[in-house]
Amino acid sequence: QVQLVESGGGLVQAGGSLRLSCAASGRTFSSYFMGWFRQAPGKEREFVASIKWSGGSTYYADSVKGRFTISRDKAKNTVYLQMNSLKPEDTAVYYCGARPSGAGQYDYWGQGTQVTVSS
């Protein structure tokens, strides 16, 4: 059974940093993209960043380029999201997801972790 477990959320002041982790288990993700999404109150879930597990290619939403960095540790089967220069508008529940390369939709999701940025 596939499991994605996020951790690392919390309360931080504007300008601060957090690192989110997503521990993946239950299958081999070598042919998958791993992604981070977020959902703020009253808004739809939006794409933040993704990484191709095998080659490491990364993709970012314009709103986080230059501030957030996605990475993965193959040995630990874990994906990270380093978030720097946080802004109040980054406040949201952050979700980790996984989708097969070439597929349009994410098959698996974690339970989410809350990130709150105070001004």
Image (tube, rainbow, N blue to C red):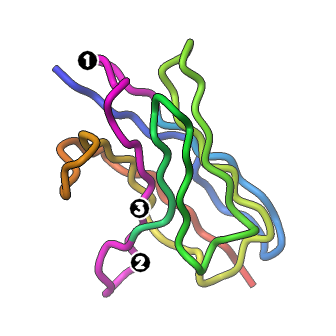
Nearest to viewer (mark 2 / mark 3) = 3
Q: How far apart are marks 3 and 1 (CA)?
A: 21 Å
Q: Which residue is drawn at 41% across and 68% down?
A: 47
> Tag 3's secondary structure?
strand
Label 3 sits on what residue type? Phe
Q: Are marks 3 and 1 in contact (CB under 8 Å)?
A: no
Give the left or right position of residue 50, taking residue 80 as reference: left
Badge 3: how crowded within 10 Å, few (<14), some, or many (20+)?
some
> What amino acid is found at the position of numbered circle 2 in the picture?
Ala
**Sequence-first disc among 3 and 1:** 1
**Picture quadrant of residue 107:** top left
Mark sitting on residue 40: 2
Q: Distance between the residues labelled 1 and 2?
A: 30 Å
Please indicate whether residue 53 sits to the left or right of residue 68 in the image.
Answer: left
Amino acid type at image mark 1? Arg
Tag 1 residue: 27
Residue 51: percent from the left, percent from the top?
49, 45
Instruction: In this rendered view, identify the residue nearer to me: 31 or 111.
Output: 31
Q: What element carries label 2?
A: loop
Number of other residues with Cα within 10 Å of mark 2, as a class: few under 14, some 14 to 19, many 20 or more: some
Q: In this view, does 36 lie above or below 44?
A: above
In the rendered image, residue 31 lying in the magenta stretch gets the answer yes
The residue nearer to you, when weighing 49 against 93, is 49
Q: Which residue is drawn at 53% across and 35% down?
A: 79
Of tags 1 and 2, the one toward the viewer is 1
For residue 57: magenta?
no
Span highlighted in magenta in the image: 23-46
Contact, mark 1 vs mark 2 (Cβ under 8 Å): no
Name above or below for residue 91 compared with residue 82.
Answer: below
